[in-house]
Image (tube, rainbow, N blue to C red):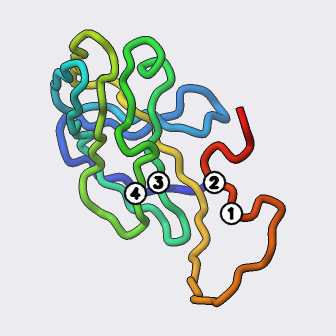
Amino acid sequence: MMEVPVRLLHPAARLPRVAHPGDAGADLCAVEEVVIPPGERREVGTGIALAIPAGYAGFVQPRSGLAFRHGIMVVNSPGLIDAGYRGEVRVALYNSGREPFAIAVGDRIAQLVIQKVEEARFLAVSDLPESARGAGGFGSSGR
């Protein structure tokens, strides 16, 4: 099991925690009270900083219950935390619901998934190899 060093930056900060053994996502909790009006977005602090190992990245995902019941989504889902970033993890949330949504200190607001990522080197070429899909883009596979 990988260990990820976490620095608690705020007295109310909590370590990311999985709810059940084997879960991929660890809950991120708020360290500030925030109200998100319908149709608006807000940035919410978690009060933690991470040292994600090289070759890995953190992906901030919405919590399915908040999304389904209240329309609360992660704006840039998934949010990306690069291995070299050492600042506070902040979550950009959007309220697609019809009512203001209040976040209290300690509320679980998103999930963090740590995944291995490959470093890519990009090469300029004159032609790409053929594929079955080709250049078919949005909607190319039908309904």
Neighbour class for label 1 at 10 Å: few (<14), some, many (≥20)?
A: few
- Determine which quarter of the picture holds residue 130: bottom right
Q: Nearer the viewer, mark 3 or mark 2?
A: 2
C-alpha distance separating marks 3 and 2: 28 Å
Q: Which residue is mark 4?
A: 81
* Residue type, mark 2 in image: Gly
- Determine which quarter of the picture holds residue 29: top left
* Residue type, mark 3 in image: Gly
- Determine which quarter of the picture holds residue 44: top left
C-alpha distance separating marks 4 and 1: 30 Å
First-in-chain label (4 vs 1): 4
Q: Tell me the number on the disc at residue 137.
A: 2
First-in-chain label (3 vs 2): 3
User: Is 35 left or right of 76, judged from the image as shown?
Assistant: left
Q: Tell me the number on the disc at residue 135.
A: 1
What is the quadrant of the C terminus in the image? top right
Which residue is at 30% across, 24% downward? Answer: 95
Q: Are marks 4 and 3 in contact (CB under 8 Å)?
A: yes
Q: Which residue is mark 3?
A: 58
Q: Which element is circle 2 on?
A: loop
C-alpha distance separating marks 3 and 1: 30 Å
First-in-chain label (3 vs 1): 3
